[in-house]
Image (cartoon, coloured by chain):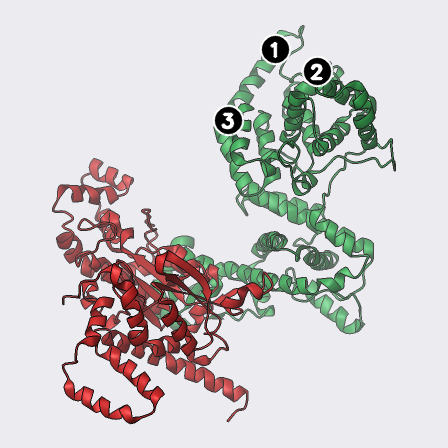
Amino acid sequence: MQFSSKKPRAVTDLKAELYSQPLQFYAQPPLENISLSEFESFAVDRLKLLKTVENLGVSYVKLNDDYLKKLDNEIRTLNFPQDAKDQTEKRRKDHISHFILRLAYCQTEDLRRWFIQQEVDLFKYRFRKLDGGEKLEFLHKNNLQYNTISAEEKDNLREKLTISSSAASGVKVEEQDFYKVPFQDALDLVRTRKVYLKEGYAYIPHNEIVTIVLNDFRTRLSKALALTARSLPAVHSDERLQPLLNHLSHSYLGQDYSVQKNVGKISLEQIDSLAGKSFPLCMRQLHQALRDQHHLRHGGRMQYGLFLKGIGLSLEQALQFWRMEFIRGKVDADKFDKAYAYSIRHMFGKEGKRADYTPYSCMKVILSNPPSQGDYHGCPFRHSDPELLKQKLQSYKVSPSGVSQILELVKGMHYQLACQKYFELTHNQVEDTSFSLSHPNQYFTESQKVLGGGKDVKRETDTLQRPQENSAARGLTAAREPAVDESQHLAEITKNLETDFQDA
Amino acid sequence: MPSSDYDPACLPDLLPLYYRRLFPFAQYYRWLNYGGVQKNYFQNREFSFTLKDDIYVRYQSFSSQSELEKEMQKMNPYKIDIGAVYSHRPNQHNTVKSGSFQALEKELVFDIDMTDYDDVRTCCSAADICSKCWTLMTIAIRILDRSLRQDFGFHHLLWVYSGRRGVHCWVCDEAARKLSAAARSAVAEYLSLIKVKQFHFSFNINVFIKGKSLTVVKRYFPQYALQDQNILGRKESEEKVLALVPEDILYIFSVHRATTAKKRQYFEKEIMLQYCYPRLDVNVSKGVNHLLKSPFSVHPKTGRISVPIDLKDVEKFDPFAVPTISLICEELDRPKADEDEAKSEDAKEKENEQDSAEKRKIRDYKRTSLAKYVKYFDQFLAEMADSWKGKLLRQSDLQKEF
């Protein structure tokens, strides 16, 4: 894609035209110069938006109230266009970021499929927000030559049209336009028999036009991506863009947990109990394997070791931890100091090129270095056999319905959502995780938040909290346990809380 | 009409005869070439053969009618399947860069199998059929044919007897051949009221059902179900009928005797539809690259030829009257009753070698029971040919060839 402005006046006219529309088909790529930083930030923002679209789409019924509210929020936060005045800048961002992501997501079938799905959902959300007049305008401006049928024809077919559509949407045939659309463009309606068909044409009421438009959008995007893929070599030759684009499709976009705010706050004795309570499944599994076998292979040591660093283990603690465990196995103290201690110090940036490695994000764990026989690293939702995963979850006392929910998500390849579900099921008071899981350390932090007194509990037990906070560094007891010499009043409050949570 | 007793063991002897003297290669090629409107349409078509001892070979393709003939006469396939038209010649698919070899087009096909009706047949089960339950096929053909033509606007439908217990439909319109997998699946789902192996009834009866299909079913139902299948006559059948009724309606029936007329209407409609509505296997229709038994292929177990069904006579179609390969091979040797016809044709043998061989072959199938089916196939092709001529004319206009 060449960013160049050869004809400034014509371009600005086009731009003004395009950005005066609330919605577009992304038919024309942007023709202007932008800075590299804008290039990157636009792309990252859109990626965040699309990831939100994906998460919401799996967690909620699409387009229900919760979904709409949350998506609205995200759009506002990320500075994308909403229905208001003066949206030109935001629409420009929308336009450019779409095309940048096309470059990053056109390369493989999987990436394409993901990108198309999220863009279609986003488009559906936006199209639904347009009012009737805006919709018509959009159709006409984009050459969707779906013709309305004449009043005469409508009259002839009235009975059939009423039956086909009114049952679904209570719509009066006389009051609205019907479009005659080739059936290939209205497959969803055909499949469910929600439309009247005659000689290869579907007769669609105006308010069903959304489906048609969506299919059109999807088809266009699909073709465009195929074309983009072919011109990719030219883009990759630009060294500034290539690393960026590669990164985008594999990127993790959150905290990197490299700065430890809480170094030393965890003691080694706590790790066993923490593993059961606050570790994500992958780390719990690694910890278990380490305890059982007094050894972990390199992949496991890296993934788990960096995680421990992220939750606050200091270098000295880490050395002590691994040493203690390995000695119980076949490794003697000398061998440990020679072979393994070096790599632990390396992890903390004390050896070699002194790079302070950051704990692995979920993306990294899921996508790189798959485990083989005898390995315990990786993401259990991604890498474990579903049967084994089921057994493991059952042994960790996850309810059967919970287990099947998780397995459903795994089947749909939503590994991080499966982990979130695991979080919900192992933290009884949480019904709806407010965060979007993308990093094992994030899981830990959120878990500690919940167990150390999350917002719901805070409401009723402010008085209980204070004595608790002092011992936060040691023993993370659940907030429900009242301190010994509390008054009866507080004990009562706690009892009420317990019943509340049990009902949940 | 008694057909010669067919013995599968004779196939190895009968097949060479069939492929040498009876298989209608000219018509077959004419069909699959589609008027030559698209380049390499025939050459890029996949065929698959099942040979003796169950050897299965895929990705067969041929560059011309004569190559097709030679190869089939050499291999003598027990079964022939037709697949999709690909981007390259299927027999060279290994030389193509992986990912580039794609299925591009194929007829839209439907497969109706009698075993999918087992739960509502009381006369036969599994692979057996009889003239009573064959009515189910007739109803299915009528309903699907009507819907494909009137709802979807298709015109060139070839209905073929599968050779044992079902029928296939080949929709040959250009628009149909170009359909995507998603579109095929949508059409098949539109047409499936009864999901195969599941009971499924939507109370959102829309135009399709309310209209002519129900009329078709109604016309046949009384005779078929009540008499032929004797539904309400025997207790177990009566129970089967009741078992079809949805739980809630049954409850309503039992609790509130005086049920409304509307509910009874639904009840009756559902029963009729459960019994008689066409049952499709959606998976057959979905894939662009799906391989389906070819017309004029032999069914190795029954010996019957997969013949096209003339829609005008669909009610009279009798699967037991379909010629077997042994019958037609036998008929080849019988002198034709009409001796005069044979004499006048002998006179024409003075023409050159190729022509007479061709003519002999044409004469050959005409002497057998296969004749009327090939004739019908010819008619079908003639109707389609008009659309090809139009296309070719337009193409040559564009190229300014005169």
State the hue of chain B. red
Subunit bearing disc 3: A
Residue B256, above or below A250: above
Residue A361, above or below B214: above
Which of the chains is green? A
Q: Is residue B328 left or right of residue A115?
A: left
Please say whether residue A100 is visible from this viewpoint.
yes
Residue A206 or A309: which is nearer the viewer? A309
First of labels 2, 3 by sequence position: 3
Q: Secondary structure at mark 2?
A: loop
Subunit bearing disc 1: A
Q: Is residue A247 left or right of residue B84?
A: right
Q: Residue at x 62, y 16 (%)?
A: A480
Q: Which mark is residue A399?
A: 3
Could you tell me if the residues under marks 1 and 2 are in contact, i.e. CB atoms within 8 Å? no
The CA span between labels 1 and 2 is: 21 Å
Decide: few, some or many residues near mark 2? Use Cα within 10 Å; few <14, some 14-19, many ≥20: some
Tell me the kind of residue under disc 2. Gly
Q: Residue at x 62, y 38 (%)?
A: A416
Tell me the kind of residue under disc 3. Ser
Q: Quick one: quadrant of the N terminus of chain A?
A: bottom right
Tell me the kind of residue under disc 1. Ala
Q: Secondary structure at mark 1?
A: helix
